[in-house]
Amino acid sequence: MEAKPPVTIHSLPEELVLDIFSYFANPAPDNRLHDQPSSEILRNTEGACPLKTISLVQRRWRAIALPLLFRCAVWVLDQFDQTLIEAGDNANAIKKIPILEFLRSTGLGHDVRSFTMIINDTMPSCTDTKMTVPSQSSWRDPDTTDTVPHRRNSTLFHNKDKNWLWEMLFSLTDPLKFTIIASPQTLARLLSCAVFVEDAEFYSHVERLHILSLSRHFPSEVAKSPQRGQLYFNLARHCGEEYVQTALFTIRPWTHMLLNENSSIRVYRNYHFFEHEPPSILPSLLGCGARPYHVPLIPPSITSLSYVAIFPTERIIRKLECALPRLDHLFVQLIPRNDILLDPDETSHVDIRDLWITSTVCYNFFLGRLLRNEGLVDMAEPSDHNTSIDPQDQNANSTPGYNWRFLKEFESGDASSEDAWTDVMQYLNKSVSAWRIKKEGLLVRGAVPS
């Protein structure tokens, strides 16, 4: 009987080889988005990627490995890329940007599950940039435009259409997670929204990077937006003002949003640190800015929000507390996971006690809202999911803290290190509150399943 030839990796079908290769892929770098933002946050810390080395062995292996290598794509924008975007040169943008052209030419765009844009420097302002400037009470004549970013009460209002960029990227890829790492000024420019900059110098002498990340559970062909989504945007249309509404938040049915606003430690060097507000797009996301940014950018498909910042001041936390969107789950992390408190450049002339006192006060804000609104909501699905929303409904749109009554889960990323969280646990254990401790750091409304 003739002996069968030995089975080697070269004789295995591609599906099995792909499964073998997947064990050599580095873990997704975007699991570090809760860390302090930097241009190096996604850099591989585990040395050379074995899968990349495997892809260089032969053409067949490379063809099998490439979809795994580009499952998490990162686009680091250089000055040319930034100028191209700001100028709105969308005619042949894909051909002019190497990573996008590579994804298009190889057909790997549909294999991308996580796409990240990293912009280290503030995007340049072009002379043809048009920014409509709102006044305190109403819009200026829509025909009046400025050629440079305009300040009104030290707030930059960006109203240039960048939707061609999102349409281009999402025609090429269909990621489950989309992340932008950039300064808040650049984020505002990309999202056509406002950013407060008057106190920026108190927070850092250089523009620090923030992280905005959107994610969903399913690819586009099987995902469905919540029914309330279409109803919600009646509010935006009711606004009636002529301004650019970014398509990024609705181009896919995102269900989770993460905003990481870096460190605020330096502002505590000032005696009146509690009066300062960081440069942030959070007010525009929440819809608590000046007109026309009083309409939230966060779409109703978002049911989970993660807010991360290192010792933020009360001023910005109060905006989150008062203008919380309608959510099922809220995650908050205010304490650093790194050793930034040992950095003398950060903590020089800072009373460390102020940091911990402020974080305790912030958690007390959240606890107050949780307890203040308990018992006010029937846990059955509210009726306004199936009826039109009246844009004039002051309870639904203007009452501070109104949406806390719909929150089902509150989670803290500081449960293991925050003294204030220990106080919360002790209080809830002794109270008759509807909120219960499901696990360390996680509170749920109602009874916890056994």
Image (spheres, helix red, strand yellow):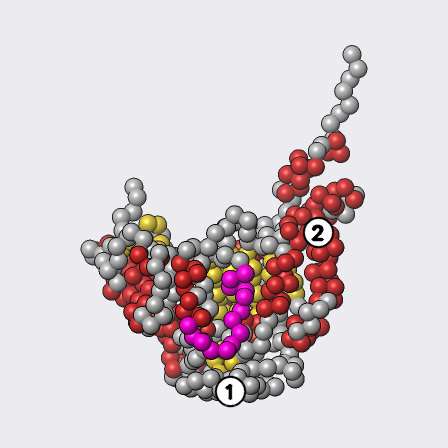
Picture residue at 38% right of the left edge, 65% below the top: 325
Give the prevailing secondary structure in the magenta stretch. Answer: loop
Picture quadrant where residue 371 is located: bottom left
Amino acid type at image mark 1: Asp
Label 1: how many Cα within 10 Å (few below 14, some 14–19, many 20+): few
Residue 277 lies, in percent from the top left, at 43, 79
Q: Please state which of residues 283 and 280 is positioned toward the viewer in this rendering.
A: 283
Q: Is residue 58 left or right of residue 279?
A: right
| Residue at the spot of label 1 | 141
Please name the residue shown 44% across and 70% down the image.
236
Labels in figure, total: 2
Q: Nearer the viewer, residue 360 or 400?
A: 400
For image coordinates 58% across by 87% down, the residue present is 146
Q: Which amino acid does the dot numbered 2 rest on? A: Gly
Q: Earlier in the sequence, mark 1 or mark 2?
A: 2
Tag on residue 107?
Answer: 2
The image position of residue 291, as x and y in percent, is 43, 80
Q: x%, y% of residue 262?
A: 50, 69
Q: CA distance from mark 1 to mark 2?
A: 46 Å
